[in-house]
Image (cartoon, helix red, strand yellow):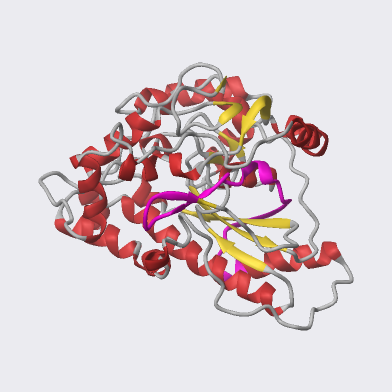
Amino acid sequence: MAWPKNSPEAEITEQMRDDWAARFGESDAALGIETTRDFQPFNQINDIFTRAFWDPKVKSDHTEGFFDSYRVAPAARRGQGFAQKDFALRNASWIISDLISDRGVEMGMREGFQALIQSDTPVAKQKVEIEDISAQSREIKRIARLFGADLVGITEIDERWHYASRVDTSDLTSVPNELPKGISHVIVMGHSMDFDLVETYPSALAGASTGREYSHEAAICIQLAAYIRGLGYEAVASMNDTALVIPYAIKAGLGEYGRNQMVLTPEFGPRVRFSKIFTSLPLRADQPMPLGLNAYCHSCTVCADACPPKALPKGAPEIGSDSPSTITGVKKWSANCEKCFGYWAKIKTDCAICMRVCPFNRQYDRWQDRLWRWLAMGRGRVWAQRWMARQGTRARMKPAEWWSK
């Protein structure tokens, strides 16, 4: 078998690059997104999780044990946060997401991860007339929040961030990554993770915070897509599939890119999962502006310092890396995906220490935290960093403490 490379199925022409520059150059500059002429849309078969099934440089007994622990054999062992009940809670939190992603397994479609979530309702034959696009956009955000989204933003379709091809999970081959015709906008939703569970990372218990939001977002994006389809417009629910959600979340104004490879939001810091809806419904795109969170990261290395496998960069953003799991031609902070996932595989659960220790990971229910955020996102950044250095990083919550609450 010839292993795939990080290059798209279709050739990217100079005309396409000129078009992208004309369409997105101004907004990219405002958001700090920097691409080069070498930019290539990412081939999904090279994401680190998929590589764990085909690439001998990633695949190992540890990675197989990691995946098995979610479905077949929870890896219970000594140590707080890794008991059988911790794994049981983590796996139970994933169950709704698992039910969705398992529906199309026989067809090589792992919905929400390596394939679009298939629609269960038809598009209504009669379209609701949209007289006021701004009002319609506000209404869609209200409905998204009704279903349970914590954050909602809207942006225009940007095919640069769509996978060059998706993965057929039945044979691990690359297949066309297609959307219905007429898609013009993307609704991006943020789903906040449980603060106390995140405080116990790294542990199997903490993994319940991730699984819970994947299950929540599966339900929420399916419901919102069904609502829009009922209005007579195309709408496709999506989680990790089809397109990179981080640039879409940034373009929708929900946050900024952080050193820890996550979207930092003013409301929850990095403690957020994202889902999206691709739709033909006429909407008004949000106009995001710099928020100040990314600027803080340039002089903060708390996450990189705390990373056990030392997978996070401490320097300035750079263009690409040698890893096929890093997108080509984008200037950004890039993790060593192989080191990061290798650590996950060894502990048999996800590690989000970089999320837990991030200075922006706060609940913001205290005035002190709101004041710190105001300083950190503005001209008082130096004072916020001094405050943080004096205060120090919060100690990890012991899983036993979480269970005793």
User: Is residue 262 left or right of 277 when viewed as pictured?
Assistant: left
- Which residue shows up at 67% across the image and 31% down it? 33
Toward the top, the furthest residue is 315
Is 271 in front, or is 176?
176
Residue 205 image offset from top left, x and y in percent: 27, 52
Is 144 drawn above or below residue 374 in the view shown?
below
Which residue is at the front of the view, 19 or 11? Answer: 11
> Where is residue 248 shown, x and y percent of the image?
64, 46
Numbered label tally:
0
Q: Nearer the viewer, residue 378 or 184?
A: 184
Q: Give above or below for 49 relative to 313.
A: below
Q: For the view shown, which residue lies furthest in the right direction? A: 131
Which image quadrant for residue 201? top left
**Residue 375 visible in rendering:** no
Which residues are drawn in magenta?
Answer: 145-174
- At x 78%, y 83%, the residue is 126
In the picture shown, does residue 199 fall above or below 7?
below
Residue 153 part of the magenta segment: yes
Q: Position of residue 76 (x, y in %)?
A: 14, 52
In this image, 128 relative to 227: left or right? Answer: right
Give whichever of 38, 291 is nearer the camera: 38
Q: Residue furthest front?
A: 1
Q: Is residue 20 visible?
A: yes
Q: Tell me what residue is drawn at x 61 percent, y 57 percent.
A: 178
**Rendered-image quadrant of the C terminus:** bottom left
Residue 131 placed where, x, y %?
89, 71
Placement of the N terminus among the 4 image quadrants? top left
From the viewer's perspective, tell me whether residue 288 is left or right of residue 200. right
User: Is residue 221 shown in magenta?
Assistant: no
